[in-house]
Amino acid sequence: MIGSSQPAQANALRRSSSRGATTATLTVLALIAFAANSVFCRLALAEPIIDPASYTAARLITGAVALWIIVVLRRNGSFGKSGGSWISAATLFLYAVTFSFAYISLSAGTGALILFAAVQITMIAVGLYTGERPRILEWFGLLIAIAGLIYLVSPGVTAPSTGGSVLMATAGIAWGVYSLKGRYASNPALITTDNFLRTVPLAIAVALLWSPVLTMTFRGLLWAALSGSITSGVGYVLWYAALPRLTATRAATVQLTVPVLAAIGGVTVLSEAVSLRLVISAVVILGGVGLAVSYQKPRRERQEPSASRGLEMGSSL
């Protein structure tokens, strides 16, 4: 019996190791995709080779198409009922359009940091409003993160654009609300696909309203299409595939890397400068959020859900 159990244990260990490696790979690819959203947007709007309204429309439309194709293929040609809603679609659209307009004046790293901070602060604030009671360490982390964000956008020579900062903070709040509305979704990929499809008429409408000053080039549309189909569409699918094997705390914690990856992308791809203010703010904000989400409740109090059922639905950027 002992001899026969050893191969079984070895096989189980190999399967566990393989699942762990797969989860790590999916997570890393998804986080790179989310950071690339900021880089693609800056590539398109920094010159500019496309206007923000057209970029938003192209990103949402190609994202909807990519997600629809993926879902249909995975469901053997059937889309079926999805559970999306127009309210969720409206918050998704608000995120996308303010995200694009904000990146007219923000660097990739600064924009991603403001977005990330606004998303996390919104979700924590809503938790407080609905009755969650953080411990002292969690409060301390939240206050540190808020202080870092205030320092980042406070007046000064190296301060980011006020208008761009407000727009990106709005995008973060919208994404936080969208995330919370779908936090217990049984099939988040399917619901996100339906919500993307519902944003298409809104995207077309904003492009038409912006028509007198539309600017479109092939390269601009290419960056928007890559952002919509690959780093948004495929990125979300990769993230949702990894989530069932991540705790909510770990899912929130690994997303701390997204602003850092976006800043690295901005420096290497766009030759953007990294100011001392951005470095200090990043350390303070990411440290504060990390402190808040890494707190572990006593075992008798803790019933931490897996990430696929926690605050992480849509918390990817």
Image (cartoon, rainbow, N blue to C red):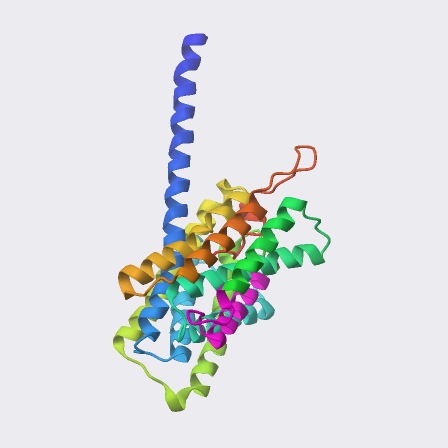
Q: Is residue 259 above or below residue 201?
A: above
Q: Nearer the viewer, residue 91 or 130?
A: 130
Q: Pick whichever, 170 or 19, lies toward us.
A: 170
Find out whether residue 47 is within the magenta segment: no
Query: Which residue is located at x 42 percent, y 41 percent?
Result: 23
The image quarter containing residue 265 is: bottom left
In this rendering, position of residue 123 left or right of residue 301:
left
Residue at 41%, 75% in the rendered image: 57
Image location (x, y in percent) of residue 4: 41, 12
The residue range painted magenta reads: 152-180
Residue 29 % position (x, y): 36, 50
Number of marks in the rendered image: 0
- Does the image show residue 277? yes
Q: Is residue 104 left or right of residue 85?
A: left
Residue farthest toward the bottom in the current orientation of the protein = 212
**Main SS class of the magenta portion in the image:** helix
Q: Where is residue 247 in the image (x, y as percent from the top left)?
A: 54, 42
Whether residue 173 appears in magenta in the rendering, the answer is yes
